[in-house]
Image (spheres, helix red, strand yellow):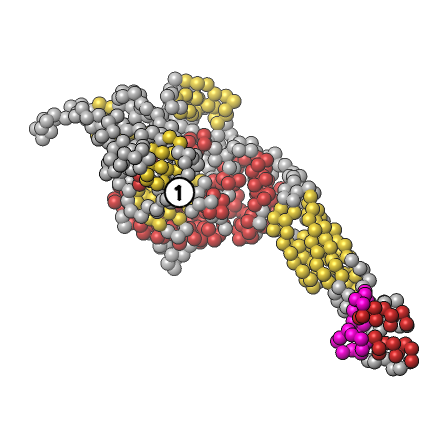
Amino acid sequence: MSLKSKVFRLFFLLLLVSYATPTLVQTQSNPDSIPFAPAVNYGAGDGPSPVFCADLDGDTNLDLAVASRWTNGDGTFQTKVDFALADIGFLNKNPATDNTILSKSAEDIMSGGIENSDNIIIDEIKMPRPHKFIDYNKDGILDLVRKEVDGKIYLYINKGSNKAPVYMPGVLYEEEIILEEPKPLKTPKISGLISWVHLPYDRFDVYIDSVYYNNNTPAIDDFFDEFEERYALLESWTDWSAEEYYGKKLRIMVSGTPGGCYGGTGGNGVGNLIFSDPLYMTGCQDAYYENGIPHFGNPGELGDWWRFMGVAMHEATHAINPKPILKRVWLAEGWASYHEFNIPSMYYGNSYPDINQETADHYIYQGDSGYNWEDYVANDYHDNSLCCKDWSNYYIVSSCDGYFCGPYDVAGCASGYGCVIYYYPTDSIYHCVKKRDCEIQESAGYRITAHMFTMLRDNYNLNWSDFYSIMDNNPETLKKAMVLGGPEWSGNSIYTDMHVIDLFEMATGTPMYPVFRYDGPSGPGWGVRNWTDLNWYADLTPVLEVSDTIPKVGDSIWLNTTIYNNGGVSLNDVVVRFYSNSALINEQVVSVVDTSFTTVSTQYSAPVGSYNIRVIVDEDNLKIEKDDSNNEDSELVSFEPYIRGDVDGNGGINLADVIYLANYILKGGPAPIPLQSGDVNCDGKYDLVDVIKLARYVLFGEPFPC
């Protein structure tokens, strides 16, 4: 997900659930008998989150501090001060009284559950980050040395005291030092502005706004106990994890909204959930369906509040999506929407699933905000939802009402135009952008793509277990698709799209080109334009050579295979199998670099007879290739019987064989051909007795020893 796309998605959610204007109220000395003065409203910037009032400058008047996600206020108060990464300041300019720290550090505790926001955090020393306290300037007061997210170590001089530290702006610390690793946050971290309660689980960590937690415990604790079981199903079902793709344990941030029901964002190993406060607020129930009729009183374990869990599954899917999938929005949102409803339909918390399959399919097909299959098909297989805008046709205005995926025909824009606002540190630019229809590969997908997945399951025998297994076996191709597709989260790249569609073909056994391609308004294709033949796929071709095609019984021959990769993807974990007729001889797992080769060998022997020796590369078709028809090569090998005593293998027994065997036994010369032919007396040994017995047979005509 690009930073720009992520910011706009977050803004859309925050505008819905957290819009507020902070108010400063001046009071008389006796508020019980004298009415309050009229409220005075001040701008708090765009996307305000935590807000608090305090006498920060010691003049007995209340001051206002606001954590804003994108821009600062309008300057009604003191001129704003921006702090860069790892910079530290104190709001009141008085080191002796306050210990307020501003940080933009991505790994710090997050404001409002949103990463990379502007945070105001009290008591920085409790932040979970590698650090150490030292008396750097020998003044008897401990200073702080800490590693920041840029990978560098900074020194923060303490101008306060050990009990009430006040740290100066950080400077690079270049001396050798061993830092203490942070301890996990086990209890609420109270800061005066924002605090978090940490709920640790084996497979994920939950951080809940402490105010929200206090309002909703034990219900929110019970929710994540239930989430744990369903998340285990999601991980086992997809074989995805935050550790595998993002190198860290899944982290879930939870905050509340007084007006909405549920929402969130997710990606890169982090899920952000915004739930009603109180949790399970009246009016946030969702119906279930039987025979097309909605009902309440769901018998599943979650009752009519099942959608809260569905949204959590949606954002958890985003958080553990492979990055190439996450970068293609119509696929990413399709997967998240599919799991939002189908994980609850598969999980039985009691004798019932959370929702029945009809309910899952109904919500996917019905969709919302234009993201549904019916509207998509009726619009010539175009997405006509709110996120599709024509950026070749826009104009800038002084102000308009809207947001990135907001509605059209809004105040400040002409009919057929929507408002998009770009936010900058000191200004905002308002764009009126013309509505357009998006092809599916430019679309946000959501229920449209999820319904495609449903049809693959129901109409094309898609086995999801097989699909995820194949995906797990093709990380190299998935990553190559992302590289070729470029860095944008959405956009015009189709490389990852084609790769995933080919995965569906492998998992269903059905050609996917006629299923997904655009076939015009009447179908039957599903609207994918610009189909591209991915000639950069790997292409494995084995060439088998044997050391002897007519060996004697008892001989051991070498089977040597060179595996060429004539494609554009280096493959790992390629399975190579050797067969004699239908019997498996040997199996090895190798890597084959693109436009190169690797060699695999094994030894083989057999009784008298002819054998079809075969080598097959990727026999189970786990790897995506240009051509699967050239993955086998073979040679015919015939093992002939040997004559005991014919040690030189020329077909007869004479004095040359005696000399040959004597040379082998006494002087370490060449071995008999095959070795068994030198055991003249059949005692299983090769020694001087065999030479004497063979000599008496050849020279004196005595009976052959055995």
Instruction: Assign the C terminus to one quadrant of the image.
Output: bottom right
Residue at x 83%, y 75% (from the top left corner): 691
Write the residue at 37% across / 30% down. Answer: 171
Please provide percent x and percent y for residue 135: 31, 37
> Could you tell me what secondary structure mostly forms the magenta stretch?
loop
Q: Quadrant of residue 31 in the image?
A: top left
Read off the residue under disc 1.
Answer: 178
Q: Residue furthest bottom?
A: 703
Q: Is residue 296 left or right of residue 92?
A: right
Q: Is residue 523 above or below residue 67?
A: below
Specify whether residue 350 is in view: yes
The kind of residue on which mark 1 rests is: Ile
Which residue is depicted at the point 35% across and 52% down? 225
Query: Which range is magenta?
Result: 667-690
Tell me where residue 607 sits by quadrant: bottom right
- Outermost residue toward the front in this view: 138
Residue count near mark 1 (Cα–Cα under 10 Å), binned few <14, some 14–19, many ≥20: few
Q: Secondary structure at mark 1?
A: loop
Picture coordinates of residue 630 (x, y %)?
72, 49
Q: Is residue 540 magenta?
A: no
